[in-house]
Image: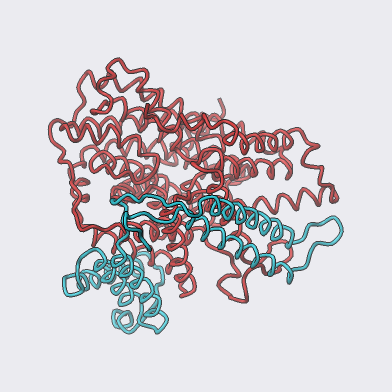
Chain colours: A red, B cyan
């Protein structure tokens, strides 16, 4: 078990006092920002990216992991207490969690979410540690055609297969690919779509796009729906602890949620939305007390929360092993790597093993910290929910502008941020998914360079993509994944969970 | 927003706008690709991807227009919960624009961010005569000091920032 000994080394790195401190700060900051209503974990990571600008790479990546898990936990807290899921993946949690909070069982709901996340995160991290090196071994033999085909699969699954509309998903992806063109072509040094503007020569920054789409888009959207009514925060009353019956109902749901979440997250399918809703539907079918569902069933919180966390860890398999981000948050993690000039992928496992394994191990540490720090601090977090919307969104916008200016102090960059904000607002109004756009921005240029490399190797033979078994199979999968939702409208049934 | 008497909006409007934007971007990409050299011999040049994406954008644009045509004349009921509040939206947007203007005339990070803060708060029902501007100044000064002094990042300087050293 080579990977387990590597993981042990990683745990040693993650337990260094300095790194432990980074993980702790990350978890606290992540929860602090993630708990604010309307802020998703990926936005949490994007907003907090500047905080890690000046740290050493290992420490900052570890802090990142903490921010990510903290952000996810914060998001579920908001979903449970004020029925405002910060992201699609928390919708399932909000259904039963908010009902539990209404009936005075907010404590157990938060506890099962936290413990479930811990259980799922821990199991998923071990699976990640076992799976990633295997994929790396495979990936070393991959040619550029295989990488290209893999990215095509990611494009299709992220934008078409799991969205509400193939057309809207593909549109979002195409906008991302378009933005990916902007800047200097790496192979020939020619400028594309830069129109002589120096700030555009370097290309569009992932962080600027993500913060614009998420933070500004969200702030504009909330402002446009502003009605001057204050949201009700359910007070956390009663015991925080779960009863024996709660434990009994929860533990199987945690394991089932993990089993659903990890594989779906690890596939280049993106998003934790699907496994969480699947988990919710599954728990509803399997429960012995169906009358409780809709009135605050603890399984309905335990399962989706575990699925959410497991799938988030699962998305790190393609990110770390192949350098392939398949969700908005994975894209933000990639941006974090890139600020140190590090490229995740098979190479990183050989060039920076201590960092990769330190990061994987810090997921274990981060999850444990989440449990230890957050449950006792629930009362404090709840107070944050009472911040009036006016100060909250004003503050978010100031932070968004600050992050962009700190990365690139130019008025052009800030203007781009606002343009992306307006884009994000319109996409939100018209129900276009934003994640494919971010994935398109990152993967577009990568896919292009693999494509060109493949054609250089094959001396211009376009059939090269079909002559190799791996790339041919992957491309076939991509075609099926693109057509499947059109053919089987029945797939939609899985998404509702409302029957 | 041109709302009907029953609070409905034309169903074909969104796909029409999106389709037009996509076609515009497709045209822009295609136009720009003309100035970029194509590859030589077996190599695919930098303009190939541009043409491919222009094609993708154009295809999606046409699909949107077809959808708009199909929905033309129909009206889509709008959830009253989802009603747009143009005043709030305008305040926040004005804040964003004013921040850019303030920065480009050299007002510095603190003042321009305080303007953004106050205008956004105003959009959320806290008028400019409330504590909004004060909170904005306090927050942006704190953010400026923390990120420049403690973390060593650089943020745009103005008269106020130079005073703080």
Q: Is residue B13 left or right of residue A237?
A: right
> Where's the N terminus of chain A, which quadrant?
top right
Q: Nearer the viewer, residue B60 or A268?
A: B60
- Residue sitting at x 31%, y 56%: B83
Q: Is residue A486 above or below residue A57?
A: above
Which quarter of the picture shows residue B56?
bottom right
Is residue B68 visible in the rendered image? The answer is yes
Q: In this rendering, would A245 be left or right of A403?
A: left
Q: Position of residue A238 (x, y in %)?
A: 12, 32
Task: State the residue at coordinates (65%, 44%).
Answer: A152
Q: Residue furthest left?
A: A238
Residue B141 spot, x, y in % from top left = 27, 72
Query: Residue A124 occupies which quadrant of the picture?
Result: top left
Compare residues A234 and A120 and report the one nearer the observer: A234
- Of residues B122 and A466, the one nearer the viewer is B122
The x, y position of residue A233, in whole percent, is 18, 45
User: In the image shown, does A30 or B91 lie closer to the viewer?
Assistant: B91
Answer with left or right where residue A457 lies relative to residue A364: right
Q: Residue B1, how many percent across, how many down?
A: 37, 63
Count of picture labels: 0
The residue at 34%/64% (across/down) is: A397
Is residue A5 in sight in this rendering? no
- Which quadrant of the rendered structure holds the C terminus of chain A? top left
Q: Is residue A333 above or below residue B140?
A: above
Tell me if residue B111 comes above or below residue A251 in the rendering.
below
């Amino acid at each position: 078990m080579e990977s387990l000994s590597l993981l042990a080394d990683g745990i040693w790195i993650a337990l260094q006092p300095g790194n432990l401190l980074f993980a702790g700060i990350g978890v606290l900051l992540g929860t602090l920002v993630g708990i604010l209503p309307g802020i998703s974990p990926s936005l949490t990571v994007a907003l907090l990216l500047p905080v890690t600008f000046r740290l050493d790479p290992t420490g900052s990546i570890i802090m990142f992991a903490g921010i990510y898990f903290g952000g996810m936990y914060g998001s579920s807290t908001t979903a449970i207490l004020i029925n405002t899921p910060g992201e699609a993946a928390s919708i399932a949690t909000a259904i039963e969690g908010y009902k539990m909070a209404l009936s005075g069982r907010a404590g157990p709901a938060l506890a099962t979410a936290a413990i479930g996340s811990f259980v799922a995160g821990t199991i998923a991290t071990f699976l990640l540690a076992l799976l990633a090196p295997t994929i790396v071994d495979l990936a070393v033999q991959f040619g550029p055609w295989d990488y290209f085909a893999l990215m095509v699969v990611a494009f299709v699954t992220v934008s078409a297969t799991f969205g509400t509309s193939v057309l809207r998903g593909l549109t979002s992806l195409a906008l991302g690919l378009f933005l990916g063109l902007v800047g200097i072509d790496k192979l020939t040094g020619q400028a594309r779509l830069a129109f002589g503007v120096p700030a555009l020569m370097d290309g569009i920054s992932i962080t600027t796009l993500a913060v614009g789409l998420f933070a500004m888009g969200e702030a504009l959207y909330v402002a446009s729906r502003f009605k001057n009514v204050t949201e009700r925060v359910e007070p956390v009353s009663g015991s925080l602890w779960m009863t024996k019956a709660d434990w009994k109902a929860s533990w199987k749901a945690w394991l089932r949620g993990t089993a659903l979440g990890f594989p779906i997250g690890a596939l280049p399918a993106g998003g934790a939305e699907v496994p969480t809703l699947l988990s919710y539907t599954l728990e509803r079918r399997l429960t012995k007390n169906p009358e409780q569902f809709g009135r605050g069933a603890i399984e309905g919180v335990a399962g989706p929360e575990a699925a959410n966390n497991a799938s988030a860890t699962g998305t790190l398999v393609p990110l770390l092993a192949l350098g392939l981000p398949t969700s908005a948050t994975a894209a933000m993690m990639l941006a974090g790597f890139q600020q140190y000039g590090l490229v995740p992928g098979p190479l990183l496992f050989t060039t920076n093993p201590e960092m990769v394994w330190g990061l994987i191990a810090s997921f274990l540490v981060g999850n444990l910290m989440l449990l230890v720090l957050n449950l006792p601090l629930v009362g404090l977090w709840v107070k944050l929910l009472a911040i009036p919307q006016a100060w909250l969104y004003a503050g978010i916008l100031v932070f968004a502008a600050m992050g962009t200016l700190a990365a690139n102090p130019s008025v052009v960059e800030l203007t781009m941020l606002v343009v992306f904000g307006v884009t994000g607002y319109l996409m939100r109004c018209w129900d276009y998914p934003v994640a494919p756009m971010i994935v398109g921005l990152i993967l577009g240029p990568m896919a292009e360079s693999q494509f060109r490399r493949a054609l250089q190797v094959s001396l211009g033979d376009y059939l090269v993509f079909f002559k190799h078994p791996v790339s041919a199979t992957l491309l076939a999968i991509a075609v099926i994944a693109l057509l499947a939702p059109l053919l089987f409208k029945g797939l939609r049934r899985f998404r509702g969970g409302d029957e | 927003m041109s709302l009907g008497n029953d609070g409905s909006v034309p169903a074909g409007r969104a796909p029409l706008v999106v389709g037009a934007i996509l076609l515009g971007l497709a045209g822009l990409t295609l136009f720009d690709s003309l100035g970029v050299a194509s590859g030589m011999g077996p190599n695919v040049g930098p303009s190939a991807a541009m043409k491919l994406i222009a094609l993708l954008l154009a295809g999606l644009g046409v699909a949107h227009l077809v959808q708009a045509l199909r929905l033309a004349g129909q009206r889509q009921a709008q959830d009253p919960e989802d009603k747009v509040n143009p005043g709030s939206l305008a305040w926040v947007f004005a804040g964003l624009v004013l921040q850019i203007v303030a920065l480009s005339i050299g007002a510095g990070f603190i003042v321009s961010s305080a303007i953004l803060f106050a205008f956004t708060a105003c959009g959320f029902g806290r008028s400019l005569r409330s504590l909004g501007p004060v909170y904005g100044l306090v927050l942006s000064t704190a953010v400026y000091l923390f990120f420049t002094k403690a973390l060593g990042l650089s943020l745009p300087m103005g008269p106020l920032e130079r005073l703080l050293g």
